[in-house]
Image (cartoon, rainbow, N blue to C red):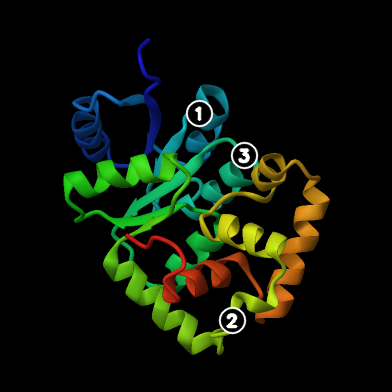
Amino acid sequence: MTEKKIRVLIADDHTILRQGLERILRDESDIEVIGQASNGIEAVRMTQELRPDVVLMDISMPDQNGIESTRQIVEAGSARVLVLTVHIERQIIASTVSAGASGYLLKDSLDNELLNAIRTVHGGGSVFSPEVTRVLATASTETQELRRSLGVLTPREKEVFYLLADGVSSSAIAEKLFVSPKTIHTHRQHIMDKLGIKTIGELIRYAIREGLVQAG
C-alpha cells in the first residue's frame, strides 16, 4: 500500500519563489504540492477547497497578510501552518504565533531544514528557526516573569498545556481528548490564570524558553 503523501499548499506573492519551493518539494517522495496561492485571501479559499495538510505561508502578501490568513485557517481547523518569511521583528513573530502558526522559518533556511519542518509540523510538532527562538525567548523575558513550575497544573491541564504549546487548536485538542471544546476552553483559561499568561502566543514562548517543546 502506498504511504499517503503530505499535501502542501504554497502561499507567497512572488511567482518565482513559489515555483522554486515547488521544485524543492516535488523531489520528495512523501510530499505533494497541491496548489499555489498568490495572496492571503486566495490562501484561505484554496485551503478550504483543497484541504492541504500543511500550508507554507508568507507574511507579506496583498489583499490579506499571512498572519490573518493563518488565524482563519487555524480557527477553521483546515490545516497546520508553517510560516516562511524574511521578517524577524518581534511583534510580527509574536502575532504569527498567537494566530496559531505551528512553525516559523526564515527564507534563508536550508532546503533540508524546510523539508524537516514540513514533516515535523505535519506530525503535530512545532518548529522555529534558531533566530526566531532567540527573539521569542527575549520577548518572553521582557513581558513578564513566567518561570513558574508546571506543578501548579493538574494532570489534565498539563496535557492540554503541551498540546497548546505544540500549536494544536482547541477544537483539535477536544477531539483528541474526547471532550467538548467548551471543556478545553475552561482548561486553557485555568492554565493561563495559574501561569500568569494572557495569550496562546505567550504560552508557546514560555514553553520554548523553558525547553518544554521542540524549537527548531
Please tell me how crowded label 1 is: few (under 14), some (14-19), or many (20+) other residues with Cα within 10 Å.
some
Q: Which mark is residue 46?
A: 1
- Nearest the eye: 119 or 211: 211
Q: Residue sitting at 21 percent across and 54 percent down?
A: 109
Residue appearing at x 43%, y 54% in the figure: 126
Q: Which residue is mark 3?
A: 77
- Secondary structure at numbered mark 3: loop
User: In what quadrant of the picture does the C terminus appear?
Assistant: bottom left
Disc number lying in front (2 or 3): 2
One can see residue 37 in this view: no
Q: Hey, what amino acid is under mark 3?
A: Gly
Identified at 39% across, 60% down, the residue is 214
Q: Label 2 neighbourhood size at 10 Å, few (<14), some (14-19), many (20+)?
A: few
Q: Foreground: 3 or 25?
A: 3
Tag 2's secondary structure? loop
Q: Amino acid at mark 1?
A: Met
Q: Residue 184's image quarter?
A: bottom right
N-term-proximal mark, 2 vs 3: 3
Question: Earlier along the polypeptide chain: callout 1 or callout 3?
Answer: 1
Circle 3 Cα neighbour tier, 10 Å, few/some/many (<14 / 14–19 / ≥20) = some
Looking at the rendered structure, the kind of residue marked 2 is Ser
Q: Quadrant of the N terminus?
A: top left
Does residue 189 sit above or below 48 in this rendering? below
Q: Is residue 169 left or right of residue 19?
A: right
Tags 1 and 3 touching, CB below 8 Å: no
- Which numbered disc flags the more N-terminal residue, 2 or 1? 1
Residue at 49% x, 60% y: name it.
Answer: 96
The percent coordinates of residue 123 (x first, y second) are 44, 41
Please indicate whether residue 183 sits to the left or right of residue 61 in the image.
Answer: right
